[in-house]
Image (cartoon, helix red, strand yellow):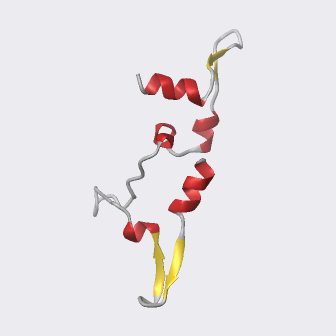
């Protein structure tokens, strides 16, 4: 799902009428513009900063047991 979201947010197309490449960033909602030109993306993956490493992170306790199991546990904790 993360790969699909990143692929969509990185789309670009050639616009013959504008004679230039148009990206998602040209048409998306940018609520903090002009200081921040990032698109506002409403996604559950924002809990993980849209980062695969954060999504796959598993934390272990001092005995080697899983302390925070997976992305579902992480989401559950964040959404409480």
Taking the view exactly as shown, the residue that stands out farthest to the right is 64
Q: Is residue 55 above or below residue 73?
A: below
The answer to whether 70 appears left or right of 75 in the picture is: right
Q: Residue at x 58, y 37 (%)?
A: 54
Q: Is residue 44 above or below residue 36?
A: above
Image quarter in which the C terminus is found? top left
Q: Residue at x 28, y 56 (%)?
A: 32
Q: Position of residue 34 (x, y in %)?
A: 28, 64
Q: Position of residue 13 (x, y in %)?
A: 53, 77
The answer to whether 25 appears left or right of 51 in the picture is: left
Q: Residue at x 51, y 42 (%)?
A: 45
Residue 29, picture quadrant: bottom left
Taking the view exactly as shown, the residue that stands out farthest to the top is 63
The answer to whether 69 appears left or right of 27 in the picture is: right
Q: Position of residue 24 (x, y in %)?
A: 45, 67
Q: Position of residue 56 (x, y in %)?
A: 64, 35
Q: Is residue 6 above or below residue 15?
A: above
Q: How many marks?
A: 0
């Amino acid at each position: 799902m993360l790969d699909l979201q990143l692929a969509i947010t990185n789309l670009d197309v050639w616009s013959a009428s504008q004679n230039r490449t148009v990206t998602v960033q040209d048409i998306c909602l940018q609520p903090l513009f002009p200081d921040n030109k990032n698109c506002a993306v409403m996604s559950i993956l924002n809990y993980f900063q849209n980062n695969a490493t954060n999504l796959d992170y598993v934390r272990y306790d001092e005995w080697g047991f899983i302390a925070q199991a997976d992305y579902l546990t992480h989401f559950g904790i964040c959404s409480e």
